[in-house]
Image: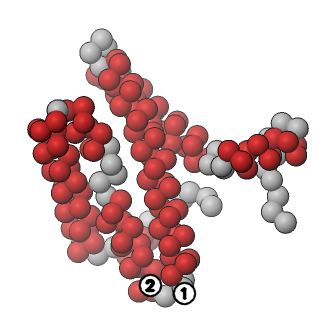
């Protein structure tokens, strides 16, 4: 699957759906704040790393596909939502890299330098994980078949 930007999707999304995403994101952020208040900022920060918009986007993606009847059958819709979840997880890994760079360097260096480096780290990790998302078993099979060649496995 190729990652791309579809500007037409902005027109398909209604104000109600944007509001729902805002409410989900705010609620998750508020819960993370309550947890941080009770257990400290380190524990609260772990919960804040949860992609706040994901629950709303997953339900809206399913509703859009069923409403437009683009894909019949719930199995296909489940796979699309699963792909969205994988993307959120990859972004979460990138967020972890961002947090580590910020945590190690923000106290010793200027923020105008640390934040762009941390953002670049997030982008690098997220894109790298997306591009190499094969399972370890698939990677080992590819390595054995091609004797280390980076060529992808062809589906039969």
In the image, 134: left or right of 110?
right
> Which quarter of the image is occupied by the C terminus?
bottom right
Residue 16 pos. (x, y %): 23, 74
The residue wearing badge 2 is 66
In the image, residue 13 lies at what x, y percent? Answer: 34, 73
Query: Residue 39 lies in what quarter of the image?
Result: top left
Q: Residue at x 52, y 37 (%)?
A: 125
Earlier-in-chain disc, 2 versus 1: 2
The quadrant in which the N terminus is found is: bottom right
Q: Is residue 100 visible?
A: yes
Vertically, is 36 above or below 103? below
Colour mode of the rendering? secondary structure
Work out whether 30 lies above or below 40: below
What numbered label is drawn on residue 72?
A: 1
Q: Residue at x 42, y 44 (%)?
A: 92
Badge 1, how many Cα within 10 Å: few under 14, some, many 20+?
Answer: few
Q: State the image quarter where residue 149 is shown.
A: top right
Task: Identify whether 77 is placed above or below 99.
Answer: below
Identify the residue shown where x is 23% and y is 68%: 20
- Numbered circle sitting on residue 59: none
32 left or right, relative to 62: left
Q: Circle 2 — which element? A: helix
User: Residue 71 location, x and y as percent?
Assistant: 54, 83
Which residue, as the protein is rendered here, is positioned at the far top? 108
The quadrant where residue 79 appears? bottom right
Residue at (49, 54) in percent of width and height: 87
Give above or below for 68 relative to 121. below
Q: CA distance from mark 2 to mark 1?
A: 7 Å
Secondary-structure class at tag 1 = loop
Residue 11 shows in the view = no
């Amino acid at each position: 699957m190729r990652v791309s930007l579809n500007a037409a999707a902005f027109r398909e999304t209604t104000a109600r759906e944007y509001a729902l995403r805002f409410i989900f994101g705010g609620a998750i952020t508020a819960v993370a704040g309550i947890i941080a208040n009770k257990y400290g900022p380190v524990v609260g920060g772990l919960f804040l790393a949860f992609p706040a918009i994901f629950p709303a986007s997953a339900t809206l993606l399913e509703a859009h596909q069923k409403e437009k009847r683009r894909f019949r059958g719930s199995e296909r819709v489940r796979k699309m939502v699963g792909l969205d979840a994988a993307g959120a997880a990859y972004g979460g890994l990138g967020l972890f890299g961002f947090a580590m760079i910020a945590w190690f360097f923000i106290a010793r260096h200027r923020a105008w330098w640390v934040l762009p480096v941390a953002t670049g780290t997030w982008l690098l990790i997220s894109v790298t994980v997306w591009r190499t998302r094969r399972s370890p078993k698939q990677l080992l099979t590819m390595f054995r078949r091609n004797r280390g060649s980076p060529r992808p496995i062809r589906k039969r």
